[in-house]
Image (cartoon, rainbow, N blue to C red):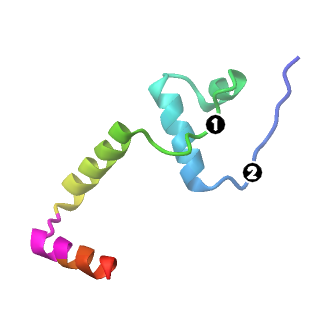
Amino acid sequence: MSVQIDIRNIPREIEDELAVQAARTSESMQEGFKDGRGQPAPRPSLDEWLNRIRRRKELTRRTVAANIILDHLAVDRQ
């Protein structure tokens, strides 16, 4: 017997991650929960993370000079 539940006050990031997982498997979020896979990954894989960075970089088209990055690293290490 199926039971219907409502889950409220989920942070937007978690809802977005669940939607991405559902889209990857061509299923609804509800189907993912039925199969027990309806849990957001605690961290994206390295490939997913790099792809996100690349997409963000393409969208913003911002660049940072290497010397600025190195200066910030030097300050962080002090």
In which quadrant will I find the N terminus? Answer: top right
Classify mark 1: residues with Cα within 10 Å, few (<14), some (14-19) or many (20+).
some
Q: Nearer the viewer, residue 66 or 62?
A: 66
Q: Quick one: SS at disc 2?
A: loop
Residue 66 within the magenta-colored segment of the rendering: yes
Q: Quick one: SS at disc 1?
A: loop
Quadrant of the rendered structure where residue 31 is? top right
Q: What residue is shown at x 76% (from left), y 45% (from top)?
A: 7
Q: What residue is shown at x 36% (from left), y 41% (from top)?
A: 46
Q: Nearer the viewer, residue 68 or 8?
A: 68
Query: Is the residue 68 above or below the residue 53 in the image?
Result: below
Identity, as a three-letter code, of the amino acid under mark 2: Arg
Q: Position of residue 29 (x, y in %)?
A: 61, 31
Q: Is residue 48 visible?
A: yes
Q: Which residue is mark 2?
A: 8
Q: Which residue is mark 1?
A: 39
Identity, as a three-letter code, of the amino acid under mark 1: Gln
Q: Position of residue 78 (x, y in %)?
A: 32, 83
Distance of label 1 from label 2 (alpha carbons) = 15 Å
Q: Range of the magenta residues? A: 62-70
Task: Judge from the rendering whether residue 5 lies leftward or rightward of residue 66; answer left or right.
Answer: right
Q: Nearer the viewer, residue 21 or 70?
A: 70
Query: Is the residue 28 above or below the residue 69 in the image?
Result: above
The single residue placed furthest to the right in the displayed view is: 1
Q: Position of residue 60 (x, y in %)?
A: 22, 61
Q: What residue is shown at x 59% (from left), y 46% (from top)?
A: 15
Q: Is residue 65 visible?
A: no
